[in-house]
Amino acid sequence: MIIPTRYKSKIPHTHSYPLGAEMISRQLGVVPQREIIELWFSHSHRFHRTYYQPNHEVFGLTYSKSGYSVFMSRRWHSGQRWKINVYAVPRILRHIIQQSLIAHALPMAREWFVKNAHNEGRTGHV
């Protein structure tokens, strides 16, 4: 089962997403929340510059429980939400960033999802 993509922004030809839904789904296939995780692919305006900023977030996890969210002038009741954010990176750095995400971020994500499977708090993120 492929984790569903909730949002995917258009990006300039100079950028690329370092991971796709299939790779993420394959790596997180065993997490308890798999059926309710959403993928969000976004272009961060920080990468509009021609150079890479090493402290830029390219992959993140969030959890929220109840409340309202606003996105692009649309509102929805979020309920319990598990979300994976993937941000576009300069195409020239895609392979290097992808290797790092596969080696480090995805195993950490798997651990975070398992550890927080019974989360009763309102929010959390990595």
Image (tube, helix red, strand yellow):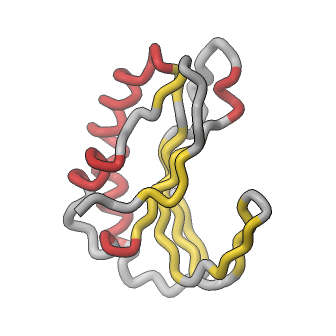
**Residue 63, position in %: x, y?**
52, 70
Spot occupied by residue 31 in the image (x, y as percentages of width and height): 26, 68
Name which residue lies at 28% across and 75% down: 32
**Quarter holding residue 11:** top right
Q: Is residue 6 left or right of residue 116?
A: right
Q: Is residue 26 above or below residue 112?
A: above
Residue found farthest to the right: 73
**Tag count in the figure?**
0
Whether residue 65 is situated above or below residue 109 in the rendered picture: below
Choose between 117 and 11: the one closer to the eye.
11
Locate residue 123 relative to residue 4 in the image: left or right. right
**Quick check: 2 above or below 80?**
above
- Residue that appears at 34% across and 52% down: 108
Q: Residue at x 45, y 18 (%)?
A: 93
Residue 1: where, in percent of width, then height?
Answer: 22, 63
**Front one among 125 and 79:** 79
Q: What residue lies at 52% left-to-right and 81% top-to-bottom?
A: 80
Q: In this image, 14 relative to 20: left or right?
A: right
Q: Position of residue 104 (x, y in %)?
A: 32, 41
Q: Nearer the viewer, residue 125 or 30?
A: 30
